[in-house]
Structures are given as C-alpha cells and as structure tokens.
Image: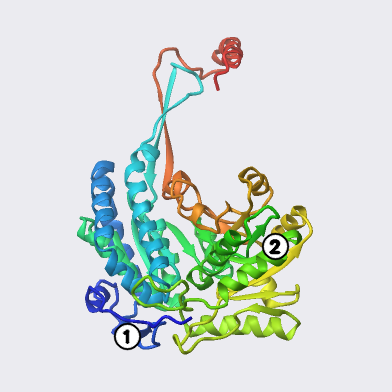
Amino acid sequence: MSIAPARTPVRSSVDALTADLVASTGRTVPIPSPATGEPISDLPRSSADDVRGAVSRARLAQLAWARLGFAERRRVLLRAHDLLLDRREELLDLTQLESGKTRGQAFEEVFQAASVTRWNALMARRVLGGGRRRSGIPLVLSTRVRYRPKGVVGVITPWNYGVSLAAMDVVPALAAGCAVVQKADDQGALSVLALRRAFIDAGLPEAVWAVVAGDPGEAGEALTDEVDYICFTGSTATGRRIAEKAGRRLVGASLELGGKNALIVLDDVDVEQAAADAAHACFSSMGQLCVSIERIYVHRRVAEPFTAALVARLSDPRIGSGLDHDADYGSLATEAQLQRVRSHLEDAVAKGARVVVGGRARPDIGPWAFEPTILADVAPDMRAANEETFGAIASIAVVDDETEAVLLANESEYGLNASVLTGSTRHGLRLAHEIDAGSVNVNEGYRGSFGSVDAPMGGLKESGIGRRNGVEGLRRFVDPVTISINRRLIPLPHTGREYARLVGPLVLLARVLRAIRRA
C-alpha cells in the first residue's frame, strides 16, 4: 500500500540554516529529497581552510566554555533540551525531508537527542567532578583525580540518523567542557544545523559548536588533522583510515562502524508478535540504521508460522514519507542507496536466493522507494550474506536449535547489535551472554539498547572501537589528571638507609590493609 508523500512547508528558513555553515568557497551542491527527488536546498561547501579556521576559533572559545563550570553548562544544555522538544515539528520535518524516513522514525531521533542532552546535563558533574582516591600510603599522602577536557573534538556524522547520532557525540563533549567542530553529511546537514541552532539559542557560544560540510577528502581529512579527539560513524573502511591517522597523531578516537546484525527467533515465541518485532527491527528507516537487523535465524519448530506471519505483515506495506504518521515504512535516502539494494538483490537471486516477500522498487511512491524485502536460501558467496546492505533487504534461515543460531549469529566479522525473540526473558538473557555483539536486545530489535542513554553503545570486532552514551561515552572527552600531596606527617625516604628503616613498617601496613580488605 502506498502512502502519498503529502508535503507541508518546513517551519524554518532553509536559507537561514545553511547560513550557519562554516563555508566560504561560494560553491554549493543541490540536496535532493527522497520524497520527490527534487532539491531541498543548495548546500554551501566548506574548504579545508574553513575547517582549520573553525578549529582555531573553537580552541579559543573552548577555554571560556570550560571555565564556565558544570552548573552553567548544565543550565545551557537543559534549556537546549526544552527547545528541542518545543521545536520538534521543525526537526521532524527536516529529518523526513532529508532522509525519507517516516514521522515515527524521525521522532525516535528527536526523542533520543533530547534524552542524551538531559542525561549529560544532569550527570556531567557526578561523572567528571573528580575527587579523592586512595593513596599509596594512607594519611601520609593525599591523592585526588580531576578530569581535564580534551579540547576541540571532531565529530563526523552520516546522513541516516543525523540528529540522534550528532547528539550522542556532540552533547557529551559539550557537557565535558570541550568545543566541537562537526563535519555533517550533505544529506543530513539541515537537520544537524537545526539541532545546533537550538543549542545556540539556549546560550551556547556559536564558536563552541561549528558545523562544516563538504567533500570528505577535503573537509573530513582536514578535520582529522586538526582536532584533539575524533568521533566517527560510518563504514568500516573509512573508520580504519581515520583510526590510522588518529594513531599517527596520538589522539583518541571512537568509531561506530558497520554491522551485519543478527536476530534469533526461538521456538517459544508468539509468532505474530515476533513477526511484528522482526519487521520493525529489519526495516525501521528502511534498514538504513547501523543497528538494524539484516540476518534472521528462526528455530525450525516455528519457522513456517513465523515466516507466514512475517510475509503477511510485509506483503502490503504502508510505504511513504509524508509529514504525518500514516506510513509504517519510509524510503531509501538516495539513488546510491537504491542501487546498492538492487545490486545485492540481483546478485543473490542470480546465485540461487529466493525472494520471500518484497523485492521491487516503488517509483509510484518515490524515486528511491523500495519494498521491504526478505530473502531465503542466501549462500555465503552472495553479497547479501556478508556485506552490510544498509537497506531494504534482510535474509531468513532455519536452524535446528539455539546453539546453531548463536554460532551463526557470531559467524560474522561484525559485532554491533543483535536480538533474541523469545517467550522467556530468562532464556533470552542467557543467550544474550553468548552473542558477540556490543549490544543485545531481548524481545526488541534495537530500541532497547539504542535508547538507553545511561548505558554504553558500540561495537566489537569490525564494528568499531570506543563507546558512546553513559559514563563511558562521557569520559571519552576528558583526560584524567592525578594530583598527589605529601602531607609530611612522616618523612619519606630519600637515601638507602632511610628506605631500609621503612621497609618493615610498610610491609606491616600492606598486611594490615589486606587483612581489613582495604584496597
């Protein structure tokens, strides 16, 4: 079923947003909307000099931003949180116009951005406030730790989840006292700029968060050459290059990279509920999500009814990208995404795979619309078996038991997200401990872990390094500094004889601390 791509005006001026980009080249690139293929805007291009200038200004602004302290930064971030909610309709419009996703899936982004902002505003002092630590010689020495902001953070975000992924990297950096220069993907730049505008209007100095856009080989390379820490979300191949450059410069990096995420359907499921969960897990944002499911392993006992339920749910999908809540599935975002999906599908079918449901482009709905597609009989030599499709295709395979399912789920170079559908929470939790992934969801595809902003999110194996969200995500942006004070209650040794006199007392102290279980 098609849903007409009814358009309503965006509530803010696109020209005003693009004016916020750091760009001086005079060059622009047209940004098409997935709903119509027609340009939304002509986006200015940033040069390497623009990037270097933004980083230079950010360095100066960061000093004042860090000196404001936790309380003032919290005030700004909480005001930004409120503005995000107040301006949600504008953010939803822009997100849909750029990405082609449904209204509901766009709301996931805005809600996530608000949640991330609130958590970091309220938790930064508690996590980064520092404090006393136990010293080597109690009472004689006093030790404490402070957390120093790293400085200027570079953030490179993709087009698919521009608002939420930007918030998950930018906001904790701001909360920690850093400044940010963000390289936004062209296709997602407008929603990123609208997100930033809420923070500026809340009181964030403009130079503390700058946004550039342009060719990755120019703007992106310049950014990684200049900043003190780099956050990247995107392909594993690009992530490797960024990690190598960061390593040569001896700066830190957090990289969320590719995924070929697996879902296991156990034999105790309610098949109708499991089919609904699986369809959403695979085709939210039409599969253009790093944590979406691309491989389904279903227990043989329920394979037939589960597959029938899944086919029934996807046979007449409500596809559209209108600025309302009528559609269940959106569009692919670009012509390149459509071609990638087609190439994976054609390769699989040519080598013997079978289309269970879907498999067709829908130009009657939008230029890059495609039906949610399930493949069976996918063999290891097919691109859809091992490469990340990042689009409207998932595969299904039957397994004889849960051990086989876990082994197949783990038989991937990636380890970003996984899911277990089961009638028993305890059963699902046990399997979750056996799956090699940075996050595992029980009876949900991705939203449980993705939305838990108090918990770390990231990948194993080829899916990246580092974590965003939670304490771990916030502490990416600081360097711990240890400060120790000699209280001179007793003289510390300097000569050999002085050391000799203290050996016995210090050994006794060590034994006493061990006896009273004190670290």
Closer to the eye: label 1 or 2: 2
Q: Position of residue 200 (x, y in %)?
A: 23, 60
Rendered position, 126 above or below 138: below
Q: CA distance from mark 1 to mark 2?
A: 48 Å
Rendered position, 368 above or below 492: below
Under mark 1, the amino acid is Arg
Q: Residue at point 48% right, 70% down?
A: 285
Q: Is residue 199 visible?
A: no
Q: Badge 1: how crowded within 10 Å, few (<14), some, or many (20+)? A: few
Q: Is residue 402 visible?
A: yes
Seen in the image, is 265 located left or right of residue 447? Answer: right
Quadrant housing residue 263 = bottom right
Q: Position of residue 254 (x, y in %)?
A: 50, 57
User: Could you say which disc has been placed on residue 297 in the image?
Assistant: 2
Closer to the chain start, of discs 1 and 2, is 1
Under mark 2, the amino acid is Tyr
Q: Residue at point 36% right, 58% down?
A: 111
Q: Position of residue 194 (x, y in %)?
A: 28, 68
Q: What count of labels does the image hold?
A: 2
**Label 1 sits on residue:** 27
As rendered, which of 373 and 227 lies closer to the eye? Answer: 373
| Mark 2 element type | strand
Q: Quadrant for the C terminus, please.
A: top right
Q: Residue at point 46% right, 60% down?
A: 231
Q: Position of residue 207 (x, y in %)?
A: 26, 62
Seen in the image, is 181 located left or right of residue 261? Answer: left
Q: Badge 2: how crowded within 10 Å, few (<14), some, or many (20+)? A: many
| Mark 1 element type | loop
